[in-house]
Amino acid sequence: MSAALRAEIEDLFFREAELLDTWQLDEWMTLLTEDASYYVPPNDKPEADHRTALFTIADNNARLKERVRRIKDPHCHAEYPHSRTRRLIGNVRVTAAAGDRIEASANFILHRFRRGEDVRVFVGQYRYKLRRENGMLKIAERRAILDAEELGALGAVSFIL
């Protein structure tokens, strides 16, 4: 894989992290393909298929748009006022590439701050399926694989991981 491609993917991942951390969710949606999906698989089966296993989140594009609409709503008590998050992205790797389709991964540490609660730390790996559309890389699939043994201590995942 070329260094230029990896740098382009890093830029995409860093831009995505910035948009999510600043709650620019409509702008974040522009990074996605029209058929994008977003998954948070079970901790004990990160390679599972969302059609046959119970996932924490298994959204197609329509469900993802609805999720974004809901968490932006001031009546969404789970995220109003919004949590403050800060993502650190590292170990970006291109894992496969064929034509306009690219698979990549990155490790993440996400700190979530919310008034009246302890700081929550989410650690894991993002796995992406990317596709080039009109010359730009877009996210066709985003899988957030959490390293936590149990999710209970992390609380609700009412924001985009």
Image (cartoon, rainbow, N blue to C red):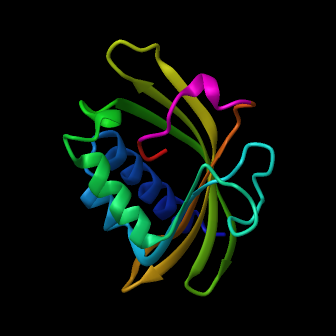
Which of these two is toward me, 9 or 80?
80
Q: Is 102 left, or right, of 80 in this rendering? A: right
Q: Is 68 left, or right, of 160 in this rendering? A: left
Residue 142 in which image quadrant? bottom right
Which of these two is toward me, 140 or 71?
71
Q: Name the residue: 35% across, 12% down.
A: 116
User: Can you say whether 137 is above or below 149 in the image?
Assistant: below
Q: Name the residue: 49% across, 70% down.
A: 60
Q: Is 76 left, or right, of 2 in this rendering? A: left
Image position, residue 135 (x, y; %): 39, 83
Q: Main secondary structure of the magenta part?
A: loop
Image position, residue 3 (x, y; %): 58, 63
Residue 26 in which image quadrant? bottom left
Which of these two is toward me, 38 or 156?
156
Total count of labels: 0
Residue 123 in which image quadrant? top right
**Which quadrant holds the N terminus?**
bottom right
Range shown magenta:
150-158
Which of these two is toward me, 58 or 99?
58
Indicate yes or no whether the magenta region holds residue 144: no
Q: Name the residue: 46% across, 17% down.
A: 119
User: Can you say whether 34 is above or below 28 in the image?
Assistant: below
Q: Name the residue: 68% across, 64% down.
A: 50
Image position, residue 52 (x, y; %): 76, 66
